[in-house]
């Protein structure tokens, strides 16, 4: 009977110890996740240039607008060498521009627009962004 009682006590002790150990390890993991910073403030270097619209194709949800960027200065960052490559013009939330939007901003094949290539130099945000000073890519009213 003593052995059985001792075995039962040891069983309870190990179960209690296992629960405490799991609680402590889970609590430690949670604290580390809270302290971890994802993203954070980002800094960009801007390279001025021009974007030439090379094609406009009608789709079911707007127009597929493609452009080629020509920089006034070659970016120092090798990952940002986009010269001569074709890119899509999308509104900030990712939708394609519609005809009303294109007409408002005079976007048509062959049009050359002022454009800045923003290249990330600090942080973990989008590495390369195109900014169009004469086109408001948040103008959702014109994109109805």
Image: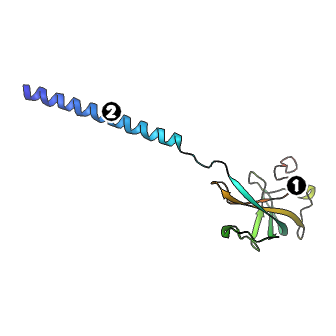
Q: Is residue 59 left or right of residue 31?
A: right
Q: In terms of image quadrants, where is residue 3?
A: top left
Q: Is residue 98 left or right of residue 78?
A: right
What is the x, y in percent for residue 143? 85, 51
What is the x, y in percent for residue 24? 37, 35
Disc 2 secondary structure class: helix
Q: Nearer the viewer, mark 2 or mark 1?
A: 2
Closer to the N terminus: mark 2 or mark 1? 2
What is the x, y in percent for residue 41? 66, 48
Crowdedness near tag 1: few (<14), some (14–19) or many (≥20) residues, C-alpha within 10 Å:
many
- Of 116 and 14, which appears nearest the observer? 116
Q: Residue at x 88, y 69 (%)?
A: 109
Instruction: Tell me if residue 30 comes above or below residue 96 in the rendering.
Output: above
Instruction: Tell me if residue 107 comes above or below residue 81 in the rendering.
Output: above
Give the labeled residue for mark 2: 20
Q: Which mark is residue 101?
A: 1
Q: Residue furthest bottom?
A: 84
Disc 1 secondary structure class: helix
What is the x, y in percent for residue 65? 81, 64
Q: In terms of image quadrants, where is residue 105?
A: bottom right
């Amino acid at each position: 009977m003593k052995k059985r009682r001792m075995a039962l006590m040891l069983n309870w002790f190990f179960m209690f110890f296992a629960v405490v150990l799991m609680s402590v390890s889970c609590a430690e993991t949670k604290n580390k996740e809270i302290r971890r910073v994802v993203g954070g403030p980002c800094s960009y270097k801007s390279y001025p240039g021009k974007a030439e619209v090379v094609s406009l194709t009608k789709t079911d949800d707007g127009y597929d607008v493609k452009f080629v960027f020509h920089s006034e200065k070659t970016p120092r960052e090798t990952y940002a060498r986009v010269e001569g490559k074709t890119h899509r013009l999308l509104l900030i939330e990712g939708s394609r521009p519609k005809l009303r939007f294109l007409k408002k901003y005079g976007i048509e094949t062959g049009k050359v627009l002022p454009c800045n290539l923003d290249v990330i130099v600090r942080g973990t945000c989008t590495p390369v962004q195109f900014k169009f000073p004469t086109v408001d890519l948040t103008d959702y009213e014109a994109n109805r």
